[in-house]
Image (cartoon, rainbow, N blue to C red):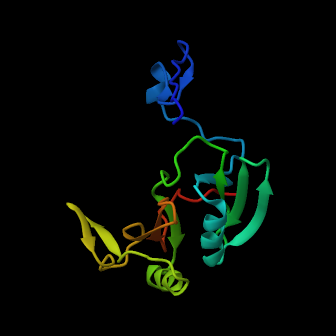
Amino acid sequence: MGEVVVTQPMEGTLSSAGVSGDSATKTPRPGTIDMRLEVVTLPVSDVGRAKAFYQSLGWRLDSDLRISDDIRAVQFTPTHSECSVTIAKGLTNTEPGSVQRLELVVSDIEAAREDLIGRGVEVGEPYHHVADGLAPGLDPERRSYLSYAAFNDPDGNGWLLQEVNERPPGRLWED
């Protein structure tokens, strides 16, 4: 497995943990450069098997690149998503199945779960957040951000369906 290298920032520079010095407690000004998360890479052990799984979800197949005998990347985009998923072997040193908690936001978690089950995906029973942890079933009031159902790809990369119908102010970018 690959080695993780942690570098120390130079004094007065930004670090991955935040901003050093007094500016760490100040509210940062909003960014002005568009930055869109467009692709997330998932490590898989068998690209062909993973490709068949993601095709079965009904996601758009964007590309299938065989870069070399050791490197292959297949890109899919979930229905109406702004972000794509690349399933790959040889692009990262991350272990297949190690990516967890990829959230797919849906407006009706029951319909999304039924659709996936109808496509042959094993989807767990819905659960929701309560004050002291998690409870089985959907949030009784169907409040946004509280109901989930989980499934995995063939390598064990973990996905969550999350029901969201209302977003609080400030959660959407203004044009």
Between 94 and 110, the residue placed more toward the observer is: 94
Between 82 and 122, the residue placed more toward the observer is: 122
| Residue at image coords 32%, 72% | 127
Between 61 and 78, the residue placed more toward the observer is: 61
Q: Farthest front residue?
A: 69
| Residue at image coords 72%, 48% | 71
Quadrant assignment, res 141: bottom left
Q: Is residue 131 left or right of residue 167?
A: left
**Residue 131 visible here:** no
Report the quarter where the C terminus lies.
bottom right
x, y (%) of residue 132?
A: 20, 60
Q: Farthest left residue?
A: 132
x, y (%) of residue 21?
A: 47, 18
| Residue at image coords 46%, 20% | 22
Quadrant assignment, res 80: bottom right
The count of marks equals 0
x, y (%) of residue 91?
A: 67, 45
Placement of 82 over or under 13, stated as above or below: below
| Residue at image coords 48%, 51% | 98
Q: Farthest top residue?
A: 11
Between 119 and 40, the residue placed more toward the observer is: 119
Placement of 155 over or under 122, stated as above or below: above
**Residue 130 visible here:** yes
x, y (%) of residue 17?
A: 47, 30
Q: Is residue 167 left or right of residue 35?
A: left
